[in-house]
């Protein structure tokens, strides 16, 4: 039996907790949150104890941690995990500062604690099947990758201001996906971006519409496009093109109904947002984390992946600001 | 050079005429129609002569005939073709009376004139490709056939009254398609029908919604469903199911555009009606007729096909009237 | 807290048990099975007690029953539930004999115990959304219903022999679906069937390929086609056609990937079989059963639905045997 | 009656000639080609005269010209048309040299002769319907445009060497499409490219895999990706994303058949190459050219469009060479 301490009892913390509870020989035994009522409510549902953050890291009743608190606390808590030498699953991102993320990664590496970073999309059955096809050679050598990622609606501008910007906050997922699928580190990054959805986002120094081109040493090209708003829901598609053909992972629609009427032929919209679209991915992600601990195998993603994705995000930001491509070495 | 005489200068006569003109070494040289102005207009466009029906059959300048006049004249004109011993393409149906159609077929057979009946759908590239797949064994042994055929809107009740009824007027195409794809004559016919679209159709002694089940000696099953009205356009689909899988020939949409918006994901409607949906089929049909004449090969469809389809239509009518299945021997 | 006694610890019993455990204030507390080891294994997983059938019905610690045992035991156990006056969820079918099912239904009615019959497909999100559209008038008045239902592979002939035949064993689901969607009882049934998949099925007096046409008093037409084998997986589709258009509930594919290569454009197969295709439906079904008990509301399906579906199956069987349509009054 | 002189009797010249012949009151009366046999064959089919280039431009029997000769002759012949003051349809591109194309454009402008440039894709019914939707506001303000364009197989390297490179030879169509749909001139161009399909293309100083990002003053983003080889045929898609939703113009498949078998669900490949995919577009293009002459209205595309597309191609080439974005003012 592995006993987990959950830090952060909000929406995503709850998702992770329920995923853990469904794995045999795994239990959430302690919950901490800066909002005590949130911790209380979730702890009760899970049959777990409410503890303070301090108690959490000092407890001998906790074998591993799940960090689902706000972004600015991730690095601190990860370092605490490293200090106490216990395994940790941490929501992405590591941190908004590359330097801080790097220090944190070094601490984790030095302590040798297993650390998994929550790049949930890698565990989406559509995308992981696509990855398997790439590995199996279905399209032969990959040449071009086109990732489309659009949110249904922009977050409040108050969030935008502390988010780190579209490249670090939203496109970070796509950078990780690109790295994973390209199976090669990008060496050049070129970004364009505009505030077309909401001028207030532009006024906050950010953009809501962006496209990034990544090139690799072997000549592969990846193009990512993002928008903070899509009237038709959460648009999450990947197209991989190569010497033997093309693979597309298309949107999952809310249902398979089709209506043919006077206006045309209508089908459902894509599933609304990440909690619906990636419900399976969140479940699989935590299951794999627990299994990796139980079987003492390698973590499927690590804090290194977080660091590399952040590096691409920083380069994209710099490219957008300067109007010039940025070389990574 | 083969010189064709066209009888009937209406909508479908024009379609056939233009198809003939596009074939090398084939020309429409004479046009006849009960409405002289119609004959005039088309003849001028084609550079052909206007002639009377009598002149048409007596002319030494006409090598073959195309009958595109009203249904009630088909049998007479076919027999005239048989008398003068010249090849003929005739629009479906042969006639609404099986006995008359049979006499007509006997005359044609006796005279030995090449005769092609206009079951245009066999020449539709979708359906002929499906037929090729069946012949090539793509789905192995055919077991079940599902034919869906819906018109965008019912014809006027005045037409319904002289049409011979839905089974002889509309489903006749599907009976031919079923015979062709089953590659075996149905031995039992069961029909149900209702006047759900327009009570006036019911009052005229006909139905507008019908389904027919055909069974063959080897156990194959074909189900045909018809409606005289579909708000989304002309619905023409075939599903063939067999031991190795399923083939579907789906509707051709007006365009390939897709619009994703707040209401869902919308694509275009099926092409509106037979002139659009079967434009290629009409062209290919006449081209094959002319080529069969030029190369002296077998006609791809004959008046026998018309006769057999009519036999199924009559059986369906009888089944609908009696509520009992009708056996064919 | 409602305490459930589960009778039958096989594959489907397990599915139902896990669904119950996920509902708040509901627990499986007792498990019985003719195979003690099966009861043991599941009881342990659920934290429940193993009991005998007798103990099950005499227990004061059980508030309601779930019958997931073999078909031939359903009627007996339902009557025991009626005797002890406790609510029951019963897997379909009620029984293979209409008379016995009727006696059973009368007992349940007389006792006034809430009884839900497991027509799982009504709870499939695709089909229940389609039903909602019909109720909301999306296609106006329903005119034609086309239900396609094909299993990936036939069961062993030993099963076929005790199954009651394709109409009672397999098409029973489609009869229920037709009744539910037509919202009107069929008055005439015509069936055709052939043993095309496996001659041994024919030798056992059954068919593996069948089509049934149902007509209603108001003139609606429903066509059901079944096959015991589809190379491409579990084919479960419904098409509803009416005055304002057409609704289709299409297959759910194993994934949304598309591969374009030299052979064409390939997508995944439909989900393999009922446990995959109807996983959500099974969960929702039991959740609604428990909720109806907790809130003392009407059962979404009852043993009456089982009785009526069986009546259609019997009529279809008789029609297939006689070659004549069967009228229901 | 407008009498056309056709210069170039090759594959595309023939396509244009047949399109003209189908328009009422329009005839190809003269044909010239550097290969006399080609001119002979086509002239005979059209009932036209074979003439020399000199005779062509001196003839008083020719009212307008169609230039379908090799790329390097376009500019010269256009200038001859300008000299003799007669309207001209010219295949794209104007020329591979921007300076020469510009001189040519100035000559045409000065002479005031109607000049249409053959950007055939604008006349594709899919893409022109998409354009109409953009103009009608279906997706509101356009924000992102994604154009995918892949050829089935690369041309011979001997052709690559004189083609002007992928940006001027292949992506030129996409630059025109982007300008047309964006309805705003791009102000910045960034290109990446690799020789991944065939190293010989790289050795010839060109690439076969490329992506270009265009930005406009108002902040719109267009991304074009090209490949010289797609195993599944000619891939021609456009996605337009905006404030009210997304429009996609997808590939037209060779047929609408679907096959479901043990491997999955298979549909046809996209139509093989430009002659198939754009057959309608070629026909509509010439029809509109002739109609614009007959009705004395504005040409739907002009040599100015050719000039602007070439400017973008040159900028893309420069960007690819330098690795830096290129600003256009």
Image (cartoon, coloured by chain):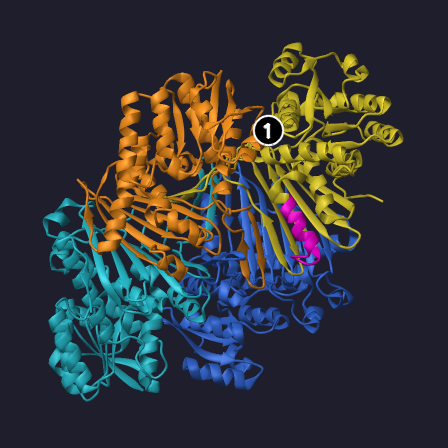
Chain colours: A blue, B orange, C cyan, D yellow
**Which of the image's four quarters has the C terminus of chain D?**
top right
Q: Nearer the viewer, residue C95 or C258?
A: C95
x 67%, y 68%: residue: A163
**On screen, A166 above or below B109?**
below
Residue C247 % position (x, y): 43, 60
Residue D30 seen by the camera: yes
Q: Which chain is home to disc 1? A: B
x 66%, y 65%: residue: A96
Q: Nearer the viewer, residue C248 or A35?
A: C248
Q: Is residue D129 magenta?
A: yes
Residue D197 seen by the camera: no
x 20%, y 48%: residue: B326
Q: Nearer the viewer, residue A117 or A221?
A: A221
x 29%, y 26%: residue: B107
Q: Is residue B76 magenta?
A: no
**On screen, D71 above or below B311?**
above
Which image quadrant is residue C128 in? bottom left
Residue A92 % position (x, y): 57, 64
**On screen, B80 above or below A223?**
above
The boundaries of the magenta stretch are D128-142
Dominant secondary structure, magenta: helix
Residue occupied by mark 1: B45
Instruction: Please state if A186 lies on the left or on the right of B202 as rendered.
Output: right
Residue B134 % position (x, y): 32, 36
């Amino acid at each position: 039996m592995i006993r987990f301490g959950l830090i952060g009892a909000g929406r995503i913390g709850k998702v992770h907790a329920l995923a853990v509870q469904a794995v045999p020989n795994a239990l959430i035994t302690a919950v901490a949150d800066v909002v005590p009522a949130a911790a209380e409510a979730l702890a009760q549902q899970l049959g777990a104890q409410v503890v303070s953050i301090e108690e959490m890291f000092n407890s001998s009743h906790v074998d591993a941690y799940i960090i689902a608190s706000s972004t600015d606390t991730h690095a601190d808590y990860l370092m605490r995990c490293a200090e106490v030498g216990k395994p940790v699953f941490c929501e992405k991102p590591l941190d908004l500062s590359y330097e801080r993320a790097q220090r944190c990664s070094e601490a984790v590496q030095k302590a040798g604690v297993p650390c998994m970073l929550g790049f949930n999309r890698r565990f989406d059955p559509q995308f992981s099947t696509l990855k398997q096809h790439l590995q199996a050679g279905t399209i032969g050598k990959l040449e071009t990758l086109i990732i489309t990622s659009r949110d249904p609606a922009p977050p409040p501008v108050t969030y935008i201001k502390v988010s780190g910007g579209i490249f670090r906050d939203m496109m970070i997922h796509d950078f990780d996906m690109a790295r994973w699928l390209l199976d090669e580190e990008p060496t050049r990054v070129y970004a364009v971006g505009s505030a077309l959805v909401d001028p207030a986002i532009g006024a906050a120094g950010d953009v809501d519409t962006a496209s990034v081109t990544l090139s690799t040493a072997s000549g592969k090209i990846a193009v990512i496009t993002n928008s903070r708003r899509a009237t038709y829901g959460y648009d999450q598609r990947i197209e991989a093109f190569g010497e033997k053909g093309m693979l597309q992972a298309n949107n999952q629609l809310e249902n398979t109904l089709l209506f043919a009427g006077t206006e045309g032929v209508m089908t459902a919209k894509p599933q609304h947002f990440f909690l619906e679209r990636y419900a399976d991915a969140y479940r699989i992600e935590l299951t794999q984390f627990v299994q990796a601990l139980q079987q003492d195998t390698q973590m499927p993603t690590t804090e290194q992946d977080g660091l590399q994705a952040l590096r691409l995000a920083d380069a994209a930001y710099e490219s957008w600001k300067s109007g010039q491509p940025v070389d990574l070495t």
